[in-house]
Amino acid sequence: MRIVAKTLLVLALVGLIGAAAVVGLGLYNVSARLGHVPGLSWVLNTTFRNSVDLYAHESEPVPPLTADMVLLGARHYDAACKVCHARPGEARSATSLSMVPAPPHITEAVEEWSANEFHWIVMEGVKMSGMPYWPSERKDEVWAMVAFLKAVPSMSADDYLALTAMPRIDMPDIAAADSIAYCAGCHGTDGRSVSDEIPRLDILGSQYVRAAMQSYIDGTRQSGYMAQAVSEIPSRHLEDVTAYFAALPPAGETPARRPPPPRAPGSSEAPGADMPRFVNTLPNTRPVETLDPLIEAGRALAFAESGSRDVPACAACHGPKADRRSPGGPEIAGQGRAYIAAQLEAWRAELRGGGPRANLMRAAAEFLEDEEIEALAAYYASLGPEALRDAAQ
Amino acid sequence: MPHRREGIEIFARKPTAVVAGAVFAAFGLSACEGPQSAFGATGADAIQLETLFIVMLVGAAILWVAVNGLFFYVTRVHTTSISRRLANGVIIGGGIGLPLVVVTALLVYGLSIMPDQRAEGDGLVVKVTGEKWWWRTEYQPLAGAPVVSANEIRLPTGSRTTFELTSERVIHSFWIPKLGGKMDMFPGRTTVLTLEPVTPGIYRGQCAEFCGESHALMAFKAVVMEPDAFDAWLEAEAAPIQADPQAPGAEIFFGEGCGACHALRGTQANGAVGPDLTHLATRESLAAAALPMNREALAKWVRNPETYKPGVKMPAYDHLSDEELDTLAGWLMELK
């Protein structure tokens, strides 16, 4: 018995010394060039697949995936993901292929996962693989990435290039022009945004835009898309970007890519002439049964005419036609329906911060019901250029 | 006998204990004073309840003295054996007969005044809704449109006012001890209470059902007025705001979006989430009697309501400067 105990003790000591040598002296060769010891790749890959299978819940509801989401997801993919996973019609770079494990090409990666699995992988990332997690706490916005990924199989190389083309900004300062063009990719050169999921900036004041950018930089406002965006813009160009968008006139026609919001749900109407064909098969925005009653319900809520004792009158700060408007409350009349709804949900979930008055909006959104969020988003999105012109005066 | 002597000696030796006991008892009596005491009642219902209390107290005192007197008599005064007949008489008479008579008398008296406590109102109807943690009020006079206000109850003497009580989220209880009994307020249900104040004055009401973290800070002033004075007040209360809506303080009020939650009749501010502020400065207290009604308290309250009322729905306006808060508070004090 004593011999057994002594043998075990000696073995444990030898093991400990061995482990200390591997960690402390660096005996294990981490060279990617050498690859894993035989069988280890299989172990890691199988663990990864089974883990996604366990933690990505197939029973969770998938929101309607819309064309507007694809537009946003494509832009973010192009800026943040393409470097490893390449794009449709393009081979992976030599550098990407030299990673261990090598990231799958986007067209092959999208073939095997469900929407919920995509959502989990993009949100959580994969340890020891180089796949990062989503740079924000907001799970809701990851669905736009899922919409894009689900659209990839029907996407040609030209479709992808059309979705992600950089706009041209003519400015003497070429570096500043590049930064502005990068922002305008999503928010539009006219500031009116290319997607219902992306806020239009032409209706916002420079003070608000500046505060918003700062809160994305500070992390007081959550968004994986904007976290990536503000990290891509050199800090010396932040002011150029703010000045560019603040100078854009708020009045004008509704952007060509975004048909006027009050329209038949599930409309087959093309979102825009230059839109890739596959996008036409998706609804433009979150579908609803009928929009008109929603708009009226939203208007009543916004002006405290609904009888609600939980929802403060939005119009007191956000207009659109109040005699006096809050200096800190941004204009939202004409903003995208999907964007307004997502922001209200983020406020309610206490995931949204912002400027010095953020606590006011957090209190305002605390008791919002889902239907009220839909109604308010429908109402403010329904306000046409005329209301915008009033608001601008 | 030696026992009794010992008892007396204890009292003789420890006068400090007696004094301490008396002082402690006097502290209890101090609760009998003040605007929120059920003693010194100033409403018909509370006066009746006060009489009931005294009758019950006297009845209880008689019972206590009789029972303990008998006990004292048989253990200390008449320690020798007594006749069986007398013993039976004492047990049946003092143990069954006397309590039966006294309790029956109290019951009959108590039941006889119950209808009075459920008397119908004969004039004004006041709808009160319990909120977290304040009171939403609406006066419905016999003639004229309803008048919305908050956090204060005004009543005329000489008539019986009906209260229609309900609640927004949790159970509260409406109680003005000087005027009458309490009545619970339930979400989704209306309970009715009537009160007939007798003496004009400013009394205090309090939520009497634990309703959350600021339950203790959910109070109000109940102002009882002569009928003429009340009518004049109600007419003034029904009017739109009297302050200048273009003043610098008003600019802050509207610019900060205060109207999203608070109504100021006669302006675009029509929010229904928080108390109506049309005649805020006429109220005797601020924040449901958590603070006095003055400029300094208003500025402190707006800067950070949570400090004075934990869990309050109203957010802090601590992004405003001291000057802005003072200007705003000054204008709010003009809401007469």
Image (cartoon, coloured by chain):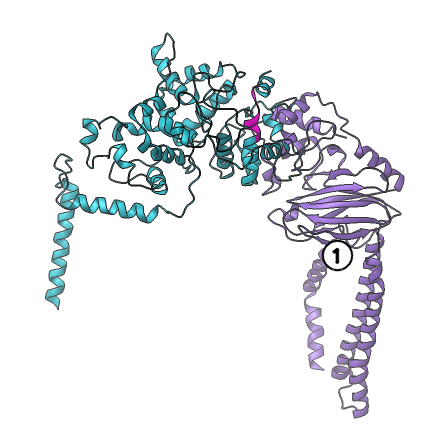
Q: Secondary structure at mark 1?
A: helix
- Chain A rendering hue: cyan
Chain bearing tag 1 is B
Q: Residue at x 82, y 69 (%)?
A: B106
Query: Is most of the magenta stretch helix, strand or loop?
Result: helix
- Residue furthest front in the image: A268
Chain with colour purple in the figure: B
Q: Is residue A380 left or right of residue B105?
A: left
Q: Is residue B100 left or right of residue B291?
A: right
- Residue furthest bottom in the image: B84
Q: Is residue B207 left or right of residue A57?
A: right
Q: Quadrant of the N terminus of chain A?
A: bottom left
Give the residue type that dot 1 points to.
Leu
Q: Residue at x 81, y 80 (%)?
A: B97
Q: Quadrant of the C terminus of chain A?
A: top right
- Residue furthest top in the image: A172
Q: Which residues are magenta?
A: A379-385
State the image coordinates of residue A117 (x, y, percent, origin top left).
34, 42
Q: Is residue B258 visible?
A: yes
The residue at which mark 1 appears reads as B29
State the image coordinates of residue A73 (x, y, percent, origin top left).
37, 30
How many labels were placed on the picture?
A: 1
Q: Is residue B284 visible?
A: no
